[in-house]
Amino acid sequence: MLVIESWVISDDAPVPVSSEMVSEALRSRIDSGQLETWLTSSSGRSLAFVTNTERAMVMLLEDEGDHGEHAVYPGAEGTSDGFVLSSAQDDEYPDDDTVPIREAFRLVEHIVGTGSWPTDARWVVDR
């Protein structure tokens, strides 16, 4: 029997968010100025989404001490700033370490729905 993990937005009410609704929830948070979102799975994994509204850093971590893995966009040149964390820290990332926001939504939807990266996604392991 295959059991799919459930995901919740870590700082919201502990109500599971579906793959069909996660992008809408992220957009709502962005519209309210919350550019950093952490989701936690029923198996203890974490999924981070940090955006500057144009690009996003998407990271998947197995547990609290894990360095995880993150989505990449090979060949992208330059850097982007404006990735504001909940601590008010304003980060800048190389564009090849982030993805366009539409792609980030797709990746998060897939991970929430299946527990893994899409087969056509590009990511690096930081462990």
Image: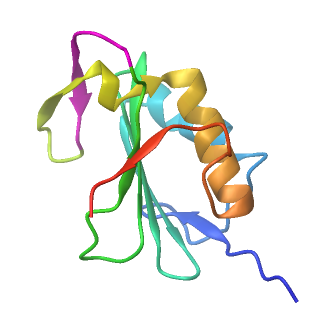
Q: Residue furthest left?
A: 89
Q: State the image quarter where residue 102 is shown.
A: top right
Q: Answer with left or right where residue 85 lies relative to residue 36.
A: left
Magenta stretch holds residue 65 = no
Q: Quadrant of the C terminus?
A: bottom left
Residue found 61% across the figure and 67% down from its top: 7
Q: Closest to the observer: 120 or 20?
A: 120
Q: Residue furthest right?
A: 1
Residue 65 picture location, percent across and down: 24, 76
Magenta stretch holds residue 81 = yes
Q: Quadrant of the N terminus?
A: bottom right
Residue found 59% across the figure and 45% down from its top: 108
Residue 71 picture location, percent across and down: 44, 40
Give the number of callouts. 0
Q: Closest to the observer: 1 or 19?
A: 1
Residue found 15% across the figure and 31% down from its top: 91
Residue 80 picture location, percent across and down: 24, 16
80 shown above or below 72: above
Residue 115 picture location, percent across and down: 65, 64
Q: Which residues are magenta?
A: 75-85
